Amino acid sequence: MNSTAEQVLDGCTKGTVLSIDFFDTLITRSVAQPTHVFAVMEQRLIAALGDTWRGFAVARIEAEQAARLHASQQDENRDVTIEEIVLQLAHQLSLDMGQRTMLIELEKETEISLVQAVPFGLAITQGARERGMKVVIVSDNYMPASHLVAMAHAAGFSWVTADDVFVSCEHGAMKHNGALWPVVFSALGVKSNDIFHVGDDQHADGAMPGKYGISSHVRSTMRTSHRTMINTTPAVLPLSRIEAWYRDTMDASTWDVAEVLGGGLVAMVVAAQILDVQSVLAKREVAGVHFAARDGYLAHQVWNTLRERGHDLPEASYTAFSRSVVWRSSLVNADALELDRFVGDDEMVTLPRLERRVGCALVAEVPQDELLPATVSREILRNNAQIIAEAASGLRTRLVRYLTAQSLLKPGHHVVVDLGWKGSTVADLAEVASDASNGASTCEGRFTGLFWEATPVRLRVALHGYAMDDVGSADDNVRLLGIIKLMEALVTAPHGSVIDYAYDGSPVFVETKPELDAYAAIVGRIANAAMRGALAIIEGTHESGVTAADITPQSVWAAMMQVGHTPRVDEIEALSAIHHVTSVDHEGSGRVMVAKAPENSSSIRVEDLPDMYNTLMHRHWMQGSLRALENNADTRWIAHEMYRINPMTSPRWVS
């Protein structure tokens, strides 16, 4: 629990002046981080002046970086001005003087339109003034004091005047390096022990004032929603507004990672699944809508709630099928290569577990509790090919009985909703349905994301990737692969995967302890927040202002990248204990989603990195694992070297 303004002021017994940082302490914006102001600017520029302004936000960030580098080479103490930043931008974008002036005014207007008071900032300045303290603003910023005054007034701080503002760009000195404090002392005629400072940056608002003998209080809650700054584009704004709303709501309490993950990224994905189906229904007649277990569980729940609330939606099924079950049902004439797929090259399994995988008893002279290497297991499978084929035939009969009950064999076009990622399981399912219905039933797969292996599958079934598909850029396809384990862990159900069907056609689920533990610990709370959030978005009641109109392929991809590709430390820590179970029988302890760092990082060689890359990509949440390595001083070099070798894995995903 954070200290209240009154508690902080009670600890300030000597100060007669309260100095307060401006951005993210006194005021904030209705977006998650400062650079997203530029995303709003880009959105407005494109709407008013066309696509030539696409990419403005990133260019604006890079221009500021260039301006700061140039200024530091002249005088390391001084800050840049907005005019210097726009001059750099003019060099990059070939802007004339009129456009430069327009951009400065637009940035000021946009800042004012997004500004809002930080409740703590409002409370502490009001409390300080009631106690007779003078209140001044001390800020590192490129905007002039007149603009900070205008923003303060727009946020409700009508008492602020230009005389109350000390901003770095006007004094040739910065708070960050301490050079601004002598300017404040001189202007106010006070000593260091007369000032009590409040800000959000540990260095600029804590360590540096301390070097001058100034007491301070650092409160960084407004920074909890920040991510990698360069990833700024209009597509990030829906998630940005949701996360900003959570930031403001939780400012006085505790940041709830599960609530934010569920109500942000996952809610947007779930809303997109539903809106995507609605787009199909608006264009053609559909015989049935089927949400796949487990990836469609949350969307199916929201779908049913919307129907109960009077939304004009057809009844939809929740259909349980899995890659292993549908594939196994097709092994009527299995060859050795198909049978070998039951066991991984490096897997050791017992005979009973092997039998559970194929769904029948196997003839083999081996001890029941002996762990068998892959070569032995595969030999047993080949020797029992006929028995396995008979079991597959029985499974197919039960599967068809289940699909009949789910109305998937009803003549007509069916929409199957799943997360992705290459569509082969839906293609297998579509073939089963088509065969069993004599071609009367056809299926279309609607996925959140698809990657390049979906391309040949398109010859078997109609596929649509909402946020990403196989025809996207190669780099984005790799980025999608790097977050698959995360997405599967978050967009899921409170039950296990289907492994068989009973005689009456009901699905048989397997429950694994790692997944049950994860659901109880955090995934269940993520799910509840996601369903609430998706409902509010679709019904237009979300308090962030985000509506169904904001859910687009671009914004959902941006949300997936913001969380999956550039996770915050709190997200990595909260999700690091989750185990992802991927074995064909859905048994075992699975693998930790965030890979553990090497015990002796100094023993890792550069030539080891390609194997490490493959392991992270295929067995873990790659991006969470890389960021975890980067956040550790001993393993940071591994992450940076990985970024160098594979640039698409670096934090920057916006081109």
Image (cartoon, rainbow, N blue to C red):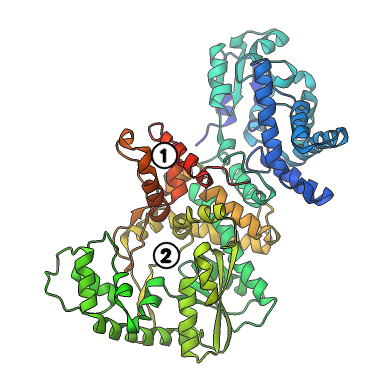
Relative to the observer, which residue lies in front, 327 or 198?
327
- Residue type, numbered disc 1: Leu
Hey, which quadrant is residue 188 in on the image?
top right
Seen from this angle, which residue lies furthest front? Answer: 607
Asked if 12 appears above or below 466 in the picture, the reply is: above
Asked if 486 appears above or below 214 in the picture, the reply is: below
> In the picture provided, is 112 more to the left or to the right than 454?
right
Relative to the observer, which residue lies in front, 447 or 221?
447
Relative to the observer, which residue lies in front, 205 or 197?
205
Count all numbered tags in the image, as a single digit: 2
> In the picture provided, is 4 more to the left or to the right than 68?
left
Expressed as whole percent of the image width and height from the top left, the position of residue 1 reads 49, 37
Q: Which mark is residue 158?
A: none
Asked if 315 appears above or below 627 in the picture, the reply is: below
Q: Residue at x 69, y 53 (%)?
A: 545
Residue designated by label 2:
494
Residue designated by label 1:
629
Hey, which quadrant is residue 321 in on the image?
bottom left
Asked if 484 appears above or below 403 in the picture, the reply is: above
Seen from this angle, which residue lies furthest bottom? Answer: 438
Expressed as whole percent of the image width and height from the top left, the position of residue 472 reads 60, 59
Q: Residue at x 20, y 63 (%)?
A: 373
Dot 2 falls on a residue whose secondary structure is: loop
> In the picture provided, is 453 more to the left or to the right than 594?
right
User: How far apart are the alpha carbons under marks 1 and 2?
Assistant: 31 Å
Expressed as whole percent of the image width and height from the top left, the position of residue 133 reads 67, 18
The crowding category of the residue bearing disc 1, from other C-alpha atoms within 10 Å (few below 14, some 14 to 19, many at least 20), is many
Q: Is residue 365 visible to the viewer in this orientation of the structure?
A: yes
Hey, which quadrant is residue 107 in on the image?
top right
Q: Earlier in the sequence, mark 1 or mark 2?
A: 2
Expressed as whole percent of the image width and height from the top left, the position of residue 159 reads 77, 26
